[in-house]
Amino acid sequence: MRLKIVQAGEPVLRERAKPLSKAEIASRNIQQLIEWMRETMHDAPGVGLAAPQIGLGLQLAVIEDKAEYQRDIRPEVLKERGRKPVAFHAIINPEITLDDSGQVSFFEGCLSLAGFTAVVPRAPKVTVRCLDHKGEPREIRAAGWYGRILQHEIDHLHGTLYIDRMKSRSFMPLENHNRFWKEKPLHSFE
Ligand code: ZN
């Protein structure tokens, strides 16, 4: 089932999401929700979707960066972003630790700010401790684009959007990004 993705301005996007118990994770409702979030993310399409984006204040997000999404991106660009395919998985009640060795900046988008993009500085590497879809503890170490996706999705669970972290002069419709800024250096936004 395709769920409605809420847009910036919906209060749920600014609230701190509620953790899930192991019993809740195992419940039919949450298992069904994970499947619907997967379908909604694919349909969008997007590489991540957090529960607040479908109107639910729960500490749950799904992530998948399919090889087919990367097919039309030049290899140099994929390499620069550290972007590789990531298999589908859910993260629940995540705690994130950022690598503090500087930041990397790239244009980033969000399904709850549909049609817009901006340059967002992010930590180059992260460690995430969370539960998976079965309620089992997981530790994820990620760099590059996957690390960026994790930071973006976990921000959603704390009521934070990329516009809180972006270089504000870089905020623009995707149309203008594609027209003027695609693959251009980002120093003009400093
Ligand atoms: Zn988002």
Image (cartoon, grey):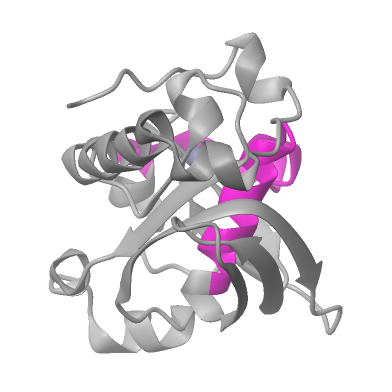
Q: Quadrant of residue 101?
A: bottom right
Q: Quadrant of the C terminus?
A: bottom right
In the image, taking residue 5 as reference, residue 42 lies left or right, namely left
In the image, taking residue 117 as reference, residue 137 lies left or right, namely right
Q: Nearer the viewer, residue 126 or 129?
A: 129
Q: Nearer the viewer, residue 118 or 31?
A: 31
In the image, taking residue 170 as reference, residue 38 lies left or right, namely left
At x 26%, y 87%, the residue is: 75
The outermost residue toward the right is 100
On screen, residue 178 above or below 132 = above
Magenta-highlighted residues: 147-176
The outermost residue toward the top is 10
* Prevalent SS, magenta region: helix
Residue 24, given in percent of the width and then of the height, sits at: 54, 36
* In magenta segment, residue 23: no
On screen, residue 170 above or below 135 = above
Residue 142 visible in the current orientation: yes
At x 60%, y 11%, the residue is: 9
Q: Nearer the viewer, residue 95 or 160?
A: 95
At x 57%, y 41%, the residue is: 23
In the image, taking residue 170 as reference, residue 35 lies left or right, namely left
